[in-house]
Image: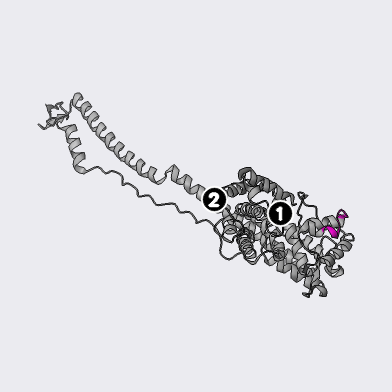
Amino acid sequence: MAQSVLQDFLNQNLISIDQNEEFTFLSKTAADVEKRIGGKKSRIIQATLVAFDPQTIPEEPLVSEVQDMITSKWKAFPSKCHDRPIPYVRAVLLAALQKLAAQPELAGIIWLTASNYLPYADGVERETALLGEFLLDVGNTYQQAVERQWSVGGKTNLPTLPELKQVAITSAVTIKKEYATTKMTLAVNGNEEAGNNNVLSSFQSNYDGQKNIKPSAAWASSFGQLAGGFIKETADIIVNSINKSLAEVASTQQLTSYTEAITDYLRALGEQATQQTAAHNLRSHLLWLKESLYSESQQVSYRQLSVAAGSVALAMDLAALVPAVYPVSVEYFLREVLRAASAAMDTEISITFTELLAAWQVELGKMAEPLPAVVAPEPGRQPLLHFVRALAAGTTQPADFEFLTGLRLTDTLNWQQAGVWLFRELQAAKLASAK
């Protein structure tokens, strides 16, 4: 669903506008709703329940809240949509959720919540298809985080190992023989310009008649200065040339960049190794649970629990063991454990929510550990998890079920579905309470 869900609602004639600015009003309201519910992640659960329910009632507090937000931007909204504001409110909520779902963890809250309720949504076919496509996109975003956290081998996801780039080395300067000869000649020969202009003194040997030449002190001094200056100049040229070449190779910037790249690579390698180790350990724990059929929360075998207690206990045990982000295969694992624990689970015979709630109400009072506490919901629509906890605490009754959850007591499901339902909502609550 590449385009805005607001546009999809317009295309499907679920809402209508007379002017382009009215669409702008709805878009701006969606941005405000995104900030408001995104600031308190537990509200994303309630917003999802309301947005995905075509039968949402006007008395819902969140409906009134969003309706007021729309009116603050679109002054004519009450007069235009006084008889059917709900589709506009839901479209705005869905648009806000669509933006929030860009974050995989928030997408997880939406998917884990809506995937339970969408099969029970009672809307027109085109709207149901739209909501299904929307939820599929959200689920795909959530699965991106799953792939990172549950990878146990196969293709690694590491950055490219950096390479130290080769740098062309500038050849050191060489001194030509002719240059050296010329310079030394100037140091000796007094006839050349800028050469040694001092003369040598001559004398006659008293012994063999041989004429010997002895440099004068002035000539020797001048020669030393000229030749020494030339040698120093030559050495400086060579040394500076070599230093320049070495500096190009051992560039501080290049070495720093290479060191940073190596550090990032090693960090990613360490994180992946840690994740893979954790994933292997988690799988080992899950296999141990399946083989032992032992409930950590109830301190007994699942075989010793009723189907009602077993579905709740396994949902709690898995939620305590599995990270908030998990692959859908974990839900199939839950179903298989329930099937192995009780023959009554190995059936697709459906029960109504009336029967489910009655069984849970009896069993939850007997369980060694109740459902874990989660963030208290805002007034209005509640997920099944909150209702079941309140039912166990005696603060609500099955008669309140339809008003508080939007589900019907006559709707049906099987015990495996019930266990998965609670597990999803425990995971969504975990994501919603994460810092």
The answer to which quarter of the image holds residue 388 is: bottom right
* Residue 162 position (above or below residue 228): below
Residue wearing tag 1? 45
Q: Position of residue 420 (x, y in %)?
A: 74, 65
Q: Is residue 23 magenta?
A: no
Residue 19: image tag: 2
Nearer to the camera, 206 or 220: 220
Q: Is residue 151 visible?
A: no
- Single out the residue that lies furthest toward the front: 79
Front residue of 371/404: it is: 404
Asked if one can make out residue 399 in the rendered structure from this viewpoint, the answer is: yes
Report helix, strand or loop for mark 1.
Answer: helix
Q: Most extreme residue toward the left, as rendered?
A: 209
Q: Nearer the viewer, residue 332 or 249?
A: 332
Q: Residues within 10 Å of mark 2 (few under 14, many from 20)?
A: few
- Magenta stretch bounds: 393-400
List x then y, in percent, for residue 424.
73, 60
In the image, is 312 to the left or to the right of 273?
right
Q: Amino acid at mark 1?
A: Ile
Q: Determine whether 419 is above or below 429 in the image.
A: below
C-alpha separation, residue under disc 2 versus residue under disc 1: 32 Å
> In front: 128, or 232?
128
Q: Quadrant of the N terminus?
A: bottom right
Amino acid on which disc 2 is placed: Gln
Tell me the element at label 2.
loop
- The residue sitting at 83% across, 60% down in the picture is 297
